[in-house]
Amino acid sequence: MRTSFAVGVDVGGTRIAAGLVERKGRIVKDAVMLTPDSGPFAIVDAIIDLIDDVTAGTHPSEVAGVGIGLPAQIDFLRQSVEFCTNLPLAGVDVRSLVMSRSRYEVTLDNDGNLAAFGESRFGAAKGARDFLMLTLGTGVGGGLFLDGEPYRGSRGMGGEVGHMVVQMDGPPCPCGGSGHIESYMGRAALGAKGCEAVERYDGSAILAEAGGDKTEVTAEHVVTAALKGDEVARGILLEAGDVLGRALVGLVNLLNPKLVVIGGGIGESCGFIMDRAEEVMATEAMAGRRDVTFVQAELGNDAGVLGAAALALDEYDSREGLHR
Amino acid sequence: MRTSFAVGVDVGGTRIAAGLVERKGRIVKDAVMLTPDSGPFAIVDAIIDLIDDVTAGTHPSEVAGVGIGLPAQIDFLRQSVEFCTNLPLAGVDVRSLVMSRSRYEVTLDNDGNLAAFGESRFGAAKGARDFLMLTLGTGVGGGLFLDGEPYRGSRGMGGEVGHMVVQMDGPPCPCGGSGHIESYMGRAALGAKGCEAVERYDGSAILAEAGGDKTEVTAEHVVTAALKGDEVARGILLEAGDVLGRALVGLVNLLNPKLVVIGGGIGESCGFIMDRAEEVMATEAMAGRRDVTFVQAELGNDAGVLGAAALALDEYDSREGLHR
């Protein structure tokens, strides 16, 4: 039997969103709540409430299952949460807990992988067999989609595009490493560059965005000032684009993708970062690999929900022996 | 029908080797000649002579086909030679030329990809579904083997592990880029470090290896001196191991492989480079991805011939609808 819907749940550090999604990618019903901060069971309860909300009125046999995206390192084969920096979910058997209290099959994945999966089914990468996705947000995440499938590596923990080393003597990265893409482009790094810049350049609009308080400068202030045309702020983001471009030189030489999709809050609002990265890549990648198309992600805030639903549909179809 | 043999041809800058290879990976007959320097057709003639040599006395129906590994950028889907630095083969339709003059199906691939393929079928990576191979030789090459298959990217030009950017402001790379793994670990880079070292350190055995002539120092002299215990030479190679380790941090975060295979002349003679790289990776890669096994390649000089034969067997089996 071919079901009509799946539920996608996108668990973030500040909010949890769920949607009842049609096979074609339309969200027919959605619900959001703030992420509880009173421990793992409260988070699981919230997930179950949201699933109940969006499936109310739909017959269970119409729902293929539930996909859940977590900001965590997931061992995809074991469906276990190995590491989770911002939420107390490491070691918690989220899948079994949600399954035992809902009537649906549940599949977990990393949120970056699911953003890529969502774009491949319903967004900017529809039909692409080989692409890589980068999400520029609090961290630099992403996912790989190779030979028509999400590629997660031997334990399902691959796809950490933001944690490639681009500068061996580079600054520390929130993950504990150093000189990674995220060390240059994560919100923390961009905020720090904004702080330095207001010390050095008097007239920058970054300071005004921060309410005149030098100690309050964040990545958001840099982005907003840049979008208003402030040259100092733009310079910071163009430098980040250079770093991204150099990282993409290596990624393109390694993976020879057809398409690069850039998403995440910062990636989607600042197209010029992507343009700069594309310029660098087109000059420095090895010949024959430069015909890569760069596109902006299309699913925006819905990427997590749609990717999670796409995963649930895929898992259902392989359980049932249906092929796409 | 299940054939018994395939021919593998390994075209290098200085010699061309061919072998008649059994399905289990035993080379039953081989032949080698120097690579002609009188143009592309002389190279094609040499390839055909070698194929004739090794197949003499074997019935054509017993031979699955011919695989040819080239030190070139191959568009695998089109089977065209796009770029070839050391031999005049770019744009030459090697496949059609060899096919029209032999009785066999011919498949071309990049030599790094084939070394990985050979190790996966007959060598150190037998049975591994996900691994990456690095070959440390004149250049730093390699190949990706993902989800049980060679991964070549959208045009078949992926797998250039040696051309990831590890240092944005790093030295130039023979490929035209800069700050790549090969910029630090290729023969040219190691030779240059050897030259610098003999200027700075009086007692190093590197100079003796070079016959006392500072201008003649090559990577080989550094390797030989290191293997004899010279500390300066060892230091150069350990530094290279550090670079390799940092590159592997990124690769492991990105691809979460089960296995890393290190081959190539320098990789195989200097196990301590690999040990150092493994140490760095184990400290700095993201948690959960560090249980990577590092192994030396097993096929040595035969890797190219065996990988090319494995490719021909695979192509034959998919043409015939046989599954492994």
Image (spheres, coloured by chain):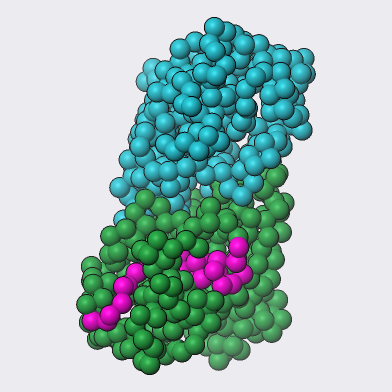
Chain colours: A green, B cyan
User: In the rendered image, is residue A81 in sight?
Assistant: yes
- Camera-side residue: B22 or B47? B22
* B102 displayed left or right of A48: right
Q: Residue at x 67, y 73 (%)?
A: A271
Q: In which quarter of the image is the C terminus of chain B?
A: top left
Left or right: B262, with A49 as reference point: right
Work out whether residue A246 can be spotted: no
Residue A117 covered by magenta stretch = yes
Q: In this view, does A204 lie to the left or right of B223?
A: right
Q: Position of residue A151 (x, y in %)?
A: 46, 56
Q: Is residue A234 above or below residue B69?
A: below
Q: Which residue is drawn at 48% across and 55% down?
A: A164
Relative to residue A155, is residue A93 depicted above or below? below
Residue B244: % across, % down: 46, 40
The reply to whether the magenta stretch includes residue B223 is: no
Q: A22 and B220: which one is in front?
A: A22
Query: Which residue lies most toward the top here?
Result: B57
Image spot of residue A113 (x, y percent): 45, 65
**Nearer to us in this view, A147 or A33:** A147
The image shows residue A38 at horizontal and vertical percentages of: 24, 86
| Magenta stretch, residue numbers | A101-127
Q: Residue at x 31, y 73 (%)?
A: A105
